[in-house]
Amino acid sequence: MNSPALSDTLLDLIRQQPGAEKAVAYLTQQADAYRNQPTTAVFYRVFTAIPRFVGKQPVSVSPDQAQQIHTLRNGFTVEDWSLDRLARVWWLLQLPADDPAVYVSTIENLFKAAEMNELMALYSAIPALQFPEHWRFQATEGVRSNMGPVQDALMLQNPYPAEQLDEPAWNQLIMKAFFCDKPVEEILGFEERTNETLARIAVDYAQERRAAGRTIPPQLWTLVKPFVTDANRAELEGLLRTHGVAGDPVQPTK
């Protein structure tokens, strides 16, 4: 990932938003001041203050801009973001990574002290942060969050979980998304990372919902289908098809 190019692209996108002149002036002035005095106190102050100076209006992203961002960081998207969220992610890219310990501790402290909107920006930025393997535990904390917008920032249209989470953490994210009625089709890697353990969990979940007289989410079929065998074919068809789960005719695995 080319962080400087992504930073420049995000700033250009901010610059192209209607009435963003004052926002861009504030951000560039603060970036210059931070380069001259690179202290954590300055970095934290700006991160917290950004909404007051840039606003919270929705960001408009053209197809060409979306593709450019995706090219710089595969799977990364800023569509449906607010301007303060975009600006905060851009600001995080201004943090130097030449000292890994300082870089990591600075962002960890932001996570610890953040309110909901700040957490949304932090989890949105995870795919663009340096030292990606370091943020795995933080991502699992996002899954456990009881704040829906924070869950969305991590789970939906975010390439980081599919790339970095191990199988148990990934399975936990998927099932938490079902429990919280998230649009699981927006989870990147949802189909590609299904696994046998997750398929068993999905079947148990479907059985629990059937026993409670509740509908069964059709997307469960995507998780289960690759692991259908001759032995369990009839049972799974009865469980999933009877309760409105659509899909192609079941073909057992070889």
Image: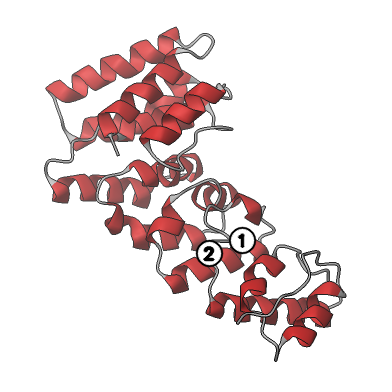
Which residue is found at the position 43% from the left and 13% from the top? 15
Confirm whether residue 190 shows in the render: yes
Q: Is residue 115 above or below residue 70?
A: below
Mark 2, secondary structure of its residue? helix
Return the residue nearer the eye: 147 or 216: 216
Q: Amino acid at mark 2?
A: Leu
Return the residue nearer the eye: 61 or 64: 64
Split into 4 quadrants, where in the image is the C terminus?
bottom right
Rate crowding at label 2 as few (under 14), some (14 to 19) or many (20 or more) other CA atoms within 10 Å: many
Mark 1, secondary structure of its residue? helix
Residue 198, horizontal then vertical, whole percent: 57, 75
Which residue is found at the position 81% from the left and 67% from the top? 245
Q: Is residue 199 above or below residue 131?
A: below
Confirm whether residue 61 shows in the render: no
Q: Residue 97 falls in which quadrant of the image?
A: top left
Which residue is found at the position 53% from the left and 61% from the top? 192
For the residues labelled 2 and 1, say whether their Cβ atoms are less than 8 Å apart. yes
Q: Residue 161 falls in which quadrant of the image?
A: bottom left
Q: Is residue 240 above or below residue 186?
A: below
Return the residue nearer the eye: 49 or 154: 154
Side of 128 where 240 appears, left or right: right
Residue 251, horizontal then vertical, whole percent: 71, 75
Question: On the image, numbered disc 1 is attached to which residue?
Answer: 177
Question: On the image, numbered disc 2 is attached to which residue?
Answer: 173
Split into 4 quadrants, where in the image is the N terminus?
top left
